[in-house]
Amino acid sequence: MAFDNQGGGFNRVMHTAGDADGCAGNWACSKCQTSIKELPFPPDPARLGQLLCKDCHRARKESFGGR
Ligand SMILES: [Zn+2]
């Protein structure tokens, strides 16, 4: 292994959808297309096309409850 990328420590952190907790990855919000790097829960593979970012998720919840 060659260390030819000295000084750039941060890019060693590579969370993927295959991480143990399954909550980190690279998805896109189905509503505003913002990129989602983390989720509060492991995503259901069947619903990867319907993911919402935190903002959209909260907005949706608020519009649901109403109180
Ligand atoms: Zn969004």
Image (spheres, grey):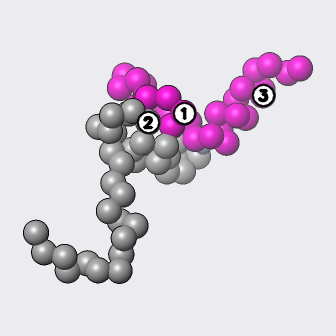
Instruction: Determine whether the residue tagged by mark 3 lies in a helix, strand or loop.
Output: helix
Quarter-wise, where is residue 66 in the image? top right
Query: What amino acid is at disc 1?
Result: Pro
For disc 2, the neighbor class at 10 Å (few under 14, some 14 to 19, many from 20) is some
- For the residue pair 9 and 57, the one nearer the viewer reads as 9
Q: How many marks?
A: 3
Instruction: Determine whether the residue tagged by mark 2 lies in a helix, strand or loop.
Output: loop
Identify whether 6 is placed above or below 15: below
| Separation of marks 1 and 3 at Cα, in angstroms | 17 Å
Q: Report whether the residue tagged 1 is closer than 8 Å to ligand 1.
A: no
Residue 53 place in picture, x, y as percent: 58, 41
Residue 58 place in picture, x, y as percent: 70, 34
Q: Earlier in the sequence, mark 3 or mark 2?
A: 2
- Give the residue at x 40% y 23%: 44
* Relative side of 31 to 50, left or right: right
Q: Are marks 2 and 1 in contact (CB under 8 Å)?
A: yes
| Separation of marks 2 and 1 at Cα, in angstroms | 6 Å
Q: Which mark is residue 63?
A: none
Q: Earlier in the sequence, mark 1 or mark 3?
A: 1
15 inside magenta stretch: no
- Give the residue at x 78% y 28%: 62
| Separation of marks 3 and 2 at Cα, in angstroms | 23 Å
The residue that disc 1 covers is 40
- For the residue pair 26 and 47, the one nearer the viewer reads as 26
Q: Quadrant of ligand 1?
A: top right
The residue that disc 3 covers is 62
Quarter-wise, where is residue 55 in the image? top right
Query: What amino acid is at disc 3?
Result: Glu
Residue 18 visible to the viewer: yes
